Amino acid sequence: MRKKLLFMLMAAVIGATGCTNMSRTQQGALSGAAIGAGAGLGISALAGGDLATGALLGGALGGLGGAVYGHEQERRHYERNY
């Protein structure tokens, strides 16, 4: 269990360092997927459902929502500045 937790922590740290050159759409998708996966996992745990399914569905929906939101921010930024 400790090895799995350590691996996940290392993956998160390495993944976070590569986010500096991302567009707003990509940042929104990544943030939304992470938040959605956490929320889906939590809801599945409370409801007694399959944790992996909850995390996958939450991550997919969160990623989609985050990408849409990030794209809208990016579009508004370019409209104001150009």
Image: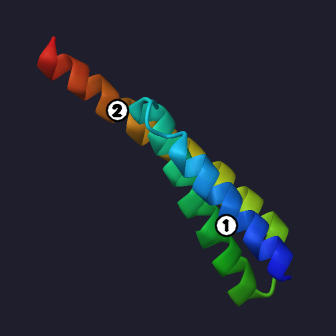
Q: Which kind of residue does numbered mark 1 sit on?
A: Leu
Q: Position of residue 59 (x, y in %)?
A: 66, 55
Q: Earlier in the sequence, mark 2 or mark 1?
A: 1
Marks 2, 1: nearer the viewer:
1
Q: Callout 2 environment at 10 Å: few (<14), some (14 to 19), or many (20+)?
A: some
- Image height check: is 14 above or below 22? below
Residue placed at 40% from the left, 41% from the top?
69
Residue 35 horizontal side relative to residue 10, left or right: left
Judged left or right of residue 26, residue 5 is right
Crowding around mark 1 (Cα neighbors within 10 Å: few <14, some 14 to 19, many 20+) is few
Q: CA distance from mark 2 to mark 1?
A: 31 Å
Is residue 69 left or right of 59 when viewed as pictured? left
Q: Please report the residue visible at 72 percent of the width from the left and 58 percent of the height from the top.
A: 57
Mark 2 — residue? 72
Name which residue lies at 62% across and 50% down.
14
Q: Secondary structure at mark 1?
A: helix
Residue 11 appears left or right of 4: left
Among the 4 quarters of the image, the one containing residue 2: bottom right
Q: Amino acid at mark 2?
A: Glu
From the viewer's side, name the closer residue of 79 and 26.
26
| Residue at image location 57% in from the left, 42% down from the top | 64
Q: Position of residue 22 (x, y in %)?
A: 46, 31
Mark 2 in CB contact with mark 1 (< 8 angstroms): no
Circle 2 SS class: helix
Question: Which residue reaches farthest top?
Answer: 82
State the mark number for residue 9: 1
On the question of residue 22 being in view, the answer is yes
Q: Position of residue 74 (x, y in %)?
A: 32, 28
- Image location (x, y in percent) of residue 40: 66, 69
**Which quadrant is home to the N terminus?**
bottom right
